[in-house]
Amino acid sequence: NLGLEKVIANYIANPNIRFMLCCGTEVKGHLAGQTMIALHKGGVKDGRVVGAEGAIPFIENLNDAAIKRFQEQIEVVNIMESEDLAAIKAKMNELKARDPGAFAADAIVVEVKEAGGGAEVAAAGANPQFLEIEKRLDKIEKKIEFVDAEVAQRVGRKIGRDIGILYGLVAGLIVFVMLLFMLQKLMAMV
């Protein structure tokens, strides 16, 4: 099940992925869709996917932390055996509409090794350098938001000061007009 392991490694490498839509005709013998659903539901015991009915339902390259992360981060939506493109598209639109946003933890990078000591296949789409750059960009974004807030606060203070001056001028003008009016009344009485 090297293919399933690669899929899971790619999913947990990207915290923005929150759904897995299982659809289409099941692969006979391996039952990849059923195995993926069973893995999400029951995890792994002694390397074997709990509840999987496929021919070779074993996970060799994913540790318990990676599987637990997969179970927490991803919601598996099962519409297996559905090949109706309109129904699949409708389900995708429904999932997009209820997107919960990025998972609240950092990405996990897992390397999946081929059987027999073959070449390593980096399954994760994000390498450690990319993750470091992403963290730096997040820090920069927070600083930009802070500066924007400071600028908005200063602009607000200036506007408040200007409005205060305007209110003061209007109030002073009203008092001045009232004094002139009262002065004329006093002069007329004398």
Image (cartoon, grey):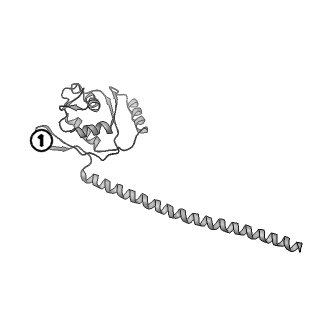
Position of 186 compared to 129: left or right?
right
Q: Position of residue 10 (x, y in %)?
A: 27, 42
- The answer to which of 136 and 33 lies nearer the viewer is 136
- Residue type, label 1: Gly
Rendered location of residue 11, percent (x, y): 29, 41
Q: How many marks?
A: 1
Residue 15 is left or right of residue 57, and the answer is right
The single residue placed furthest to the left in the displayed view is 116
At which x and y percent is residue 31? 24, 27
- Point 54% across, 64% down: residue: 157
Residue 146 makes an appearance in the image: yes
Q: Residue at x 34, y 56 (%)?
A: 137
Estimate the x, y position of residue 132 in percent, counting from the top left.
Answer: 28, 54
Q: Height in image: 89 above or below 182?
A: above
Q: Which quarter of the image is occupied by the N terminus?
A: top left
Dot 1: what SS?
loop
The residue sitting at 35% across, 57% down in the picture is 139
Q: Nearer the viewer, residue 189 or 143?
A: 189
Residue underneath mark 1: 118
Q: Nearer the viewer, residue 149 or 182?
A: 182
Residue neighbourhood size for the residue with mark 1, other residues' Cα within 10 Å, grouped as few (<14), some (14–19), many (≥20): few
Hey, which quadrant is residue 112 in on the image? top left
Query: Based on the displayed image, in which of its 4 quarters is residue 136 positioned?
Result: bottom left
Instruction: Tell me the quarter of the image containing the C terminus.
Output: bottom right
Residue 7 can be seen, yes or no = no
Left or right: 8 in relation to 163: left
